Amino acid sequence: MDPLLKELRHNPLLWLLVLVPVALVAAQLLPNAHTLLFVLSVLAIVPLAALLSHATESVAEKTGDAAGGLLNATLGNLTELVIAGAALRAGEYALVKGSIAGAIVTNTLFMLGASFLLGGLKHHLQEFNRPTARLHAALLFLATIALISPSAIAQADLLPGAALTQKLSVALAVLLIAGYALGLLFSLKTHREIFSGAEHTQTGEPAWPIGLALVTLAVATVFVALVSEIFVESVQKTAETFGMSQAFVGFIVVALVGATAEMAVAFSAARRNRLDLSVGIALGSASQIALFVGPVLVLLSYTIGPTPMDLQFWPGAVVMVFVATLVAAFITSGGRSAWFVGVLLIFVYAVFAITLYLLPPQVP
Amino acid sequence: MDPLLKELRHNPLLWLLVLVPVALVAAQLLPNAHTLLFVLSVLAIVPLAALLSHATESVAEKTGDAAGGLLNATLGNLTELVIAGAALRAGEYALVKGSIAGAIVTNTLFMLGASFLLGGLKHHLQEFNRPTARLHAALLFLATIALISPSAIAQADLLPGAALTQKLSVALAVLLIAGYALGLLFSLKTHREIFSGAEHTQTGEPAWPIGLALVTLAVATVFVALVSEIFVESVQKTAETFGMSQAFVGFIVVALVGATAEMAVAFSAARRNRLDLSVGIALGSASQIALFVGPVLVLLSYTIGPTPMDLQFWPGAVVMVFVATLVAAFITSGGRSAWFVGVLLIFVYAVFAITLYLLPPQVP
Amino acid sequence: MDPLLKELRHNPLLWLLVLVPVALVAAQLLPNAHTLLFVLSVLAIVPLAALLSHATESVAEKTGDAAGGLLNATLGNLTELVIAGAALRAGEYALVKGSIAGAIVTNTLFMLGASFLLGGLKHHLQEFNRPTARLHAALLFLATIALISPSAIAQADLLPGAALTQKLSVALAVLLIAGYALGLLFSLKTHREIFSGAEHTQTGEPAWPIGLALVTLAVATVFVALVSEIFVESVQKTAETFGMSQAFVGFIVVALVGATAEMAVAFSAARRNRLDLSVGIALGSASQIALFVGPVLVLLSYTIGPTPMDLQFWPGAVVMVFVATLVAAFITSGGRSAWFVGVLLIFVYAVFAITLYLLPPQVP
C-alpha cells in the first residue's frame, strides 16, 4: 500500500477521493438535491479516473509490451465506458451518444489544443513524430467516417425504419471492433517500430506493484460505477435547472469529466516538451472511443439497456465529429506546433461549446 | 492470332469467354431466368473487359507516348462506358448514376485498398511517388467537387426545377470534359516528366500486333455491348429477388464487375512492389470516370436516352464520393503504405457496402 | 502630390477615376437607370480600391513593421467593408452575407488560381514557402469552420429561434475577432520569423509620403462609401433585369469588384515568380474577411442596420466556403505549383459561378 499512500501525498487531485463516500451518502439522504449531487459526483469521478488510469498503466507495464499495450488500448477509457454504461442502463441514449461524440471532439480539439498551447507557451516551436501522428489521425479519420457515414447516408435518405437501423448498427459495431483489433495487431506487433516514442505507458510515474494495481483497478471501477449512477441521475435535472441543453451536457460536461485524468498526463508531457506523448494520448483516446467504446456500448445495449441502442447520431454531432477529425488530420500532418495552433484548436472547440450551450434544453 | 492464343493459354480468366455465347443464347431461350442471366452476363463481362484492356494498351504502346496516353485516357474505362450506355438506352438513370458514383468509390477505396493490402502482405513498407499520387488525388479531388457541388448546392437549396437542372448539367459536363482535356495536355505534354514512373501502359505484359489489337478492340466492344444489355435487363429483377437495393447493385455489383480487368493489373503490380502503377490505375481510373465518362454519358443521353439525364446524384452518393475522395487525398499525401492502410480503405468501403446492402430495395 | 500624379500617369486603371463624379451625378439625374448606374458604380469602385490599397500600404510602410502589419491587417479589406457597410445600412442582409462568403470563395479559388495560372504560364514550376502557406491555410480553415459550424449545427437541428441565433452570432463574432487579434500577435510578434517573405507590404511600388497617403485614405474611403450606395441600390434591380440570382451578384460580382486592386498586385507578383506574395494576399485576405470583416459587420448591424444581422448563411454558401477551404488546404500543402493547378482552382470557381448564375433570381 506504500506506493498508493505516496501517490496520495504527492497528488493533490487524489484528495478529492474523500468526496466519493460523501457523494454516495448524499445520494441516499438527499435524493432530490440534484445540483449538489451533480457537483459531488463530478468531483468524485475525477480522482477515481486518475486512480484507474494509473492502475491500468501499472498493470500494463508489468505484463510486457504487447499485452500491456492491449490492456491500455482496451481499458484506457474505462471511465468513459463505465459512465456511459450507467447512462445506458438508465436508457439515457441521447446522453450516451452525446458523450461518445463529445469525447471524440473533446480529445481531438480541447485536449490536443491545450497540450499545444501549454507546451507552446514554454517552448517556441515543438516537433512531434509526424508518421506516428499521421497514423493516429488516419485511424481516427477512418474510424470517424465509419461512425458517421451511416448517419449521413441514412439521414440523407429517407429513414429506412428502426429495425433496419438496428441491424446496420450491430453490423457496423462488429466491423469497427474487428478493425480496432487489426489496428492493435498492426501497431503492437507487425509495425510496432513506427509507433515507438509515443507509447501510452511512458508517463514517467513509477509503476505500482501488480497486486496493488489490480485491486485498485477493481475497487476504483466499482466506485466509478456507483458514482456514475448518481451523476447520470442528477445531470439531466441539473441541466434543466441551469437551462443547459442535453447536448451541451453530453458533449462538454461529461466528456471533460471523463477525460480529466488523461488530460493531466497529456498536459504535463507537453510542458516537458514530449509532444509525441500528448498527441498519442489525445488522438489515441479519441480513436479508441470511436472504434471500441462506442461499438461495445451498442452491443452492450442488447444486454443491459432497456431497448437496443443504434449508432445513428443527430446531424449536429455528425458535423462536429467530422470537422474535429478534419482539423486533427490537417494540423498533425505538419509535425510542428506553436502556441497559436493550440489557440486555434481550443477556439474551434469554443465555437462548438458556445453553440451547444445556447441550444434549447430539449436538444437533442 | 498467335499472341491471343498464347494469352488464352496462360490467362485462366479468359476461359470465361466461353460464357459469352452461352449468355447470348440463354437470353434468347430463357428471357425470364433473370438470376441465371445476371450471373452469366457478369461472368461473361469479366474476360471481355480483360481483352478490351489489353487491346487498348497494345494499341497505345504502338502509337507512341502522347497519342497512346490519350487513347488509354479515353478508352481505359470503355467497359464502364459501354455498360452505362446500355443502362442509358434502357432509361435506367438511377443505375447509370449509381455506377458512375460507385466506380469512383470502388476504385478509390477498394481497388487502392486491396492493392495496399496485397502489396503490404508481401512487403513490409512500400513507397510510391508522392508528387504523382498527389497530382492524381488533386485531379480526382477537384473533379469530384465539380461533380458533387451542383447536387449539394441545389439540394441544399430548394430545387430550381428540372429545366434548370438540365441546363446546369450540360454546362458542367462540357466544363468537365474541357478540364479533362487540359489535364491530358498537362500530364502528357507540358509537365510529363512529373508523371513518369506511373504510366498506365507499363503493365509488363507483351503488346499485341496492332492489327490483332484493333480487331480485338472492335469485336470485344460489340460483345460487351450485347452482354451489357442482358446484364442491365436482368440486374434489377435479380436485385428484387435477393432483396438488394438498387443502390447496392449500382454502387457495388456493377462497379466491381466493370473494374475487374483493371483490378487484376493493379493487384499484380502491388505484389511486384510497383505501387506507383497501382495508385495510378486506381486513382487515374476514378478521375477519368468523374471527369470524362460521367459527363459523356450526360451528353449522350440527349442522343440515345429516352429523356435527358442530369448530373444530380442522391445525397447518400454525394456523401460517399466526397468521403472517398477525402480519404484518398489524405492517404496518398504520405507516399508510404503498409498493410493496415489497405485494411482501413477496404474497411471504409465495407461500411458503405453494408449500409447500401441494408437499404430498402427501392432506394434510390 | 507629385507621387500621386506619377501614379496616375503610369497606372491606366486610375484613369477610371473620372467615372467617380460621373456616377455620382448620374445617380442624381437618372435615379431609375439602374443598369447604367450599376456599370458606372462598378467601374468607379475599381480605381478607388486601387488607391485605397496603395495608400494603406504606404502608411503601413512608414509606421514600422508591427504597426504597419496591424494596419494592413485591419484596413486591407476596407473596400469590402465599406461596400458591405452600405448594404448593411440598406438592410440588404442577403447581399452582405453573400459578399462575405463570396469574397472568401473568390479570393481562395479565383485569385489564388489565376495567380497560379498566370505565374505558371511564364514559369515551368513555381515554389512557395510551404510553412507560410500552411499557416495561412490553417488560419483560413479554422476561421471558416468557426463561420460555418453554427449554420451547420443549427441548420442540422431545428431552428432554435431568432433570439437565440442573434445571441450566438454576437458571441461568435466576439470570439472570432479575439482569435484574429491573437493571430496578429502570433504572426507579427511572437513567431514573425516564420512569416517572413510573405509580407503584404512588399509590393515593389514606391511608397507615398505619409501626408499624401493619409489624405488619399480618407478621401478615397468617403468616395467608396458614396459610390457603394449607388452600387447597392442599383445591383438588385440590375440583377432582376438580367435574370441573375441575388446569390450570383453577391458571390461573384460584388466579390470580384471588391477584390480588383488586390488581384492586380497578386497577379503581378505571380508573373515575377514571387508566389509567396500572391499566396499571402489571396489567403490572407480570405482569412481576414472571415475572421474580421464578417464579425465586425455583425456587430455594426446593431448600430447602423435596421435590425441585427446574424451569422447564419444559406446552406449552399456553407458548402461552397467549406469546399473552397478544403481545396486551399490541400493545394497549398504541397508548396509547388504549375499552370494546371491554377486551372483546377479556376475550374472549381467556374462550377460555383455557373451553378449560382442558373439559380432562380429570388435565391437566396
Image (tube, coloured by chain):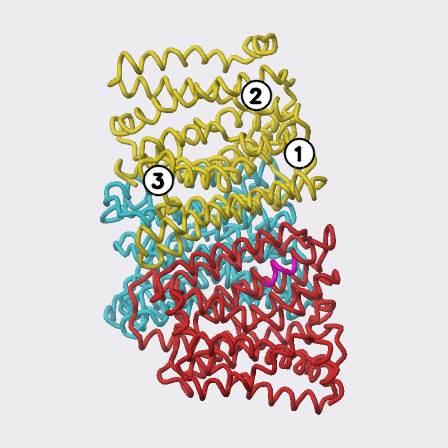
Chain colours: A yellow, B red, C cyan
The residue beneath circle 3 is A355
Q: Are marks 1 and 3 on the same chain?
A: yes
Marks 1 and 2 sit apart, C-alpha to C-alpha, by: 17 Å
Q: Position of residue B274 (x, y in %)?
A: 73, 63
Disc number placed over residue A66 in the picture, else none: 1
Q: Quadrant of residue B154?
A: bottom left
Could you tell which of marks 1 and 3 lies nearer the N-terminus?
A: 1
A350, above or below C334, in the image: above
Could you tell which of marks 2 and 3 lies nearer the N-terminus?
A: 2
Q: Is residue C343 visible?
A: yes
The residue beneath circle 2 is A55
A70, above or below A36, in the image: below
- Whether residue A135 is in magenta: the answer is no
Q: Secondary structure at mark 2?
A: helix
Q: Are marks 2 and 3 on the same chain?
A: yes
Could you tell me which chain the residue with mark 1 belongs to? Answer: A
Q: Amino acid at mark 3?
A: Thr
Q: Position of residue C89 (x, y in %)?
A: 27, 52
Magenta-highlighted residues: B111-116
Mark nearest the camera among 2 and 3 is 2
Q: Is residue C210 visible?
A: no
Could you tell which of marks 1 and 2 lies nearer the N-terminus?
A: 2
Q: Amino acid at mark 2?
A: Ala
Marks 2 and 3 sit apart, C-alpha to C-alpha, by: 37 Å
Mark nearest the camera among 1 and 2 is 1
- Whether residue B115 is in magenta: the answer is yes
**Are there few (<14), some (14-19), or many (20+) residues within 10 Å of tag 2?**
many
